[in-house]
Image: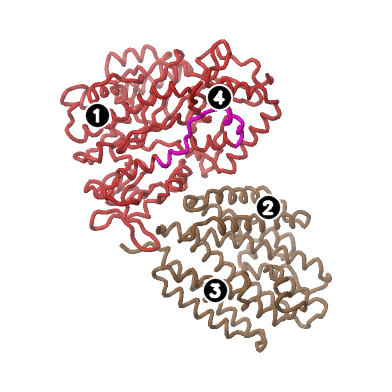
Amino acid sequence: MNKTWQGYNSSLFYDELLTSSGNPRTAARAMINFLQRLPEEEINERRSAAELAIRDMGISFTVYTEGGNIDRNWPFDIIPRTITAKEWSKVSLGLQQRTRALNCFIDDIYNKQRILADQLMPADIVLESTNYKPQCRGVSPRYGAWAHICGSDLVRNSNGKFYVLEDNLRVPSGVSYMLENREITKRVLPELFENYSIQPVDDYPSKLYQTLASLSPRETRKPCIAVLTPGIYNSAYFEHAFLAQSMGAELVEGSDLHTGDDDCVYMRTVDGPVKVDVVYRRIDEDFIDPEAFRKDSMLGVPGIMRAWKAGNVAIANAPGSGVADDKVIYAYVPEMIRYYLKQEPLIDSVKTYLCMIEKDREYVLANLDKLVVKPANESGGYGIMVGPHASVQTRREFAALIENNPRNYIAQPTLSLSTAPTYIDHTVEPRHLDLRPFILQGKDTWVTPGGLTRVAMTKGSLVVNSSQGGGSKDTWIVEGN
Amino acid sequence: MTMLSRVAERLYWMARYLERAENTARLTNAYTHLIMDLPRDTQVGWEVLIQMLDAEPVYTKRYRVFNEQNVLRFLIADQENASSISNSVRAARENVRTTRDVLPEETWEHVNELFIYTQETAEKSIGRRHRYEFLEQIISRCQMVNGLLMTTLFREHSHRFIKLGHLLERADMSTRIIDVGAGAILGRAETNQAIDPLLWGSMLKSLSAMSAYRHKIGPLVEPNAVVNFIFKEARLPRTVYFCLTGILEELQPLSNNGDAIQIVESALQKLTRFDAENMTLPQLHQFIDQLQISLNQLDDAINTAWFLPMQS
């Protein structure tokens, strides 16, 4: 064994690759044996090769607050995270079930509102949410599908069980990193692919294409699909370009599109205006149409909501989908599954305390040192307090925030997130991670094999977001034993 | 498959900037070689390079003296010079960054590599010691991208607008090189039998046209023959005639192409009638001025027909 692995402790948390006694788990065995036998200088060479590949591919993550639009390379750890195909197929079914229920919920809320009439949840938490868009009332997208692309964050607790931590239904990003990570691993650890049967991830763009094409309002052989990006200064621009390219779709900015007098959406081309069938929007719905939402938006397409409501263009994700992407609504997802699908949830949610409910709030305020407190509407890991790691001062600030605006806060027990071996300088150390699979919902439902594994590169940290200094790993769904 | 106007515009400018970086590198390389061959008291100085690039107003705002150090810094690494090699590469990369979805996958990797190389190396390549290697690298990396596009790019609008950008920029550069080069050589008080062939030869070299000239015309480098060759030779990719016929070919299949085609056809007619033999230097200048005006009009026509937001 090379000395980089010496002293690795897998007994403090659930480790993805090793048992608590330090033996490799089945899916990871051949890979760990291989890495442990590599001479240290060769490991360094391969890590440098990965860095070079990342640089060449221009994988970069722009963070808004850094100013001046600096590209920061997205750290990549070469040790893959492995999951057996058997375990994954169960998780995958759970995710499909969940996404179907969420779509039933959104469709219900913008139409009959049965779930509110049946009093499964208080009407005001839905209708008074900033994510509820009255402009979308009465619209019925094809297949009842609103959230066509869903990125759900999974974590594994100390008991080894997967939990859904949150559902991202607005404009989830990260899928291109999942694809690029596999590409890099193939370049730097090619030997491993000889003896492993790893489910390929490469067909995501074609699955995405099929999903989007199935939404087209016109029966054409090749519908015109446009990926709508806010532009080069958006942190996920790289991904927008990548997806457009790999789907053979047009990458458009708001100014490339306009809505005609016939309530159809057109793009401006060198051959004149061309009708667009499906818009895969990567801009927030508040900016999508200054006629319907924020009037100051320069990114959107005036009139596109008109065209959508008239059924002349499909928008993915449908405007208004964010109503189910709310940490308060999250607490009710198990109920939705029972209510709409008449099934028991196949995958667990994390116990969630709603600060708007008096009993819950009292518990949260009394146990701030044990809980993770999150704002209901933020994404990207902003505004979160991890109780056990927070100072007395911070806890006091959050107590005040909660009391001032209880609707906007939820709390969950601090999970012992699983770890996986990660190269830190010249040794392998355990680091916490999560997993973001992507679920596609159009005519059919489909889940990525694996997803994007995000790693908190700082020792002990539980925050894996790329905007907060996280990194990523390749994720292998391994067949057989 | 059609193409977004915005994308067409960015591809066109990507090509122009790549071509500009490469041409500036060729020109600088050829000129550096030439200067080493010339006796120290020759009346040819570094300002000729600045004149060729039509950059005197920007240059004189930044520098007082036209010495080697200043001129080379200006051409290679100056952030204030929008057309420096460093800035041209940066602009080309920005345009690829926003059009990678329509280009072959490796284009971005190569252009990004070129950008990183330029960022890391430009500043220390101003001096003679590292200059040659840097300029050769710029040329060969630009060529690599061109080769990649030529051998893998789907022949549709993307290819068309890239080719238009390359050819227009190249025609523009070749015209300037003759204009200033001929002016500098022929405009001197007395001709110098020892030096003149070197000067004309360096002009051919900066256009990679030396061996083609020898092959077609012969070993003796003779002024009028050089000018005619660079303007009118139909089979050499860096001549003005070759560029204009290439542009015409790309304009034909586009819709809304009337204005642009008329400008190119009229310029080609003038070029066909042109002969350096019976021209004075001022006449040559005037001819080149007209050609430059045509190229600017062509750029305007392309912009109006395909890039500008249509009125809806």
> Residue under mark 1: which chain is it in?
A
Q: Residues within 10 Å of mark 2 (few under 14, many from 20)?
A: many
Magenta stretch, residue numbers: A187-206
The residue singled out by tag 2 in the image is B122
Do the residues marked 2 and 1 share a common chain?
A: no
* Residue B55 in view in this figure: yes
Which labelled disc corresponds to residue A126? 1
Query: The chain drawn red is chain what?
Result: A
Q: In this view, does A118 lie above or below A259?
A: above
Q: What residue sits 29% from the left and 45% below the top?
A: A314
The residue singled out by tag 4 in the image is A458
Q: In this view, does B240 lie above or below A367?
A: below
Q: Is mark 1 on a helix, strand or loop?
A: helix
Give the left or right position of residue A61, taking residue B282 as reference.
left
Rounded to the nearest angstrom, the CA distance separating label 2 from label 1 is: 58 Å
Nearest to viewer (mark 1 / mark 3): 3
Which labelled disc corresponds to residue B244? 3
> Residue under mark 3: which chain is it in?
B
Residue A195 placement (x, y as % from top left): 57, 27
Q: What residue sits 83% from the left and 70% below the top?
A: B40
Q: Residues within 10 Å of mark 3 (few under 14, many from 20)?
A: many
Do the residues marked 3 and 2 share a common chain?
A: yes
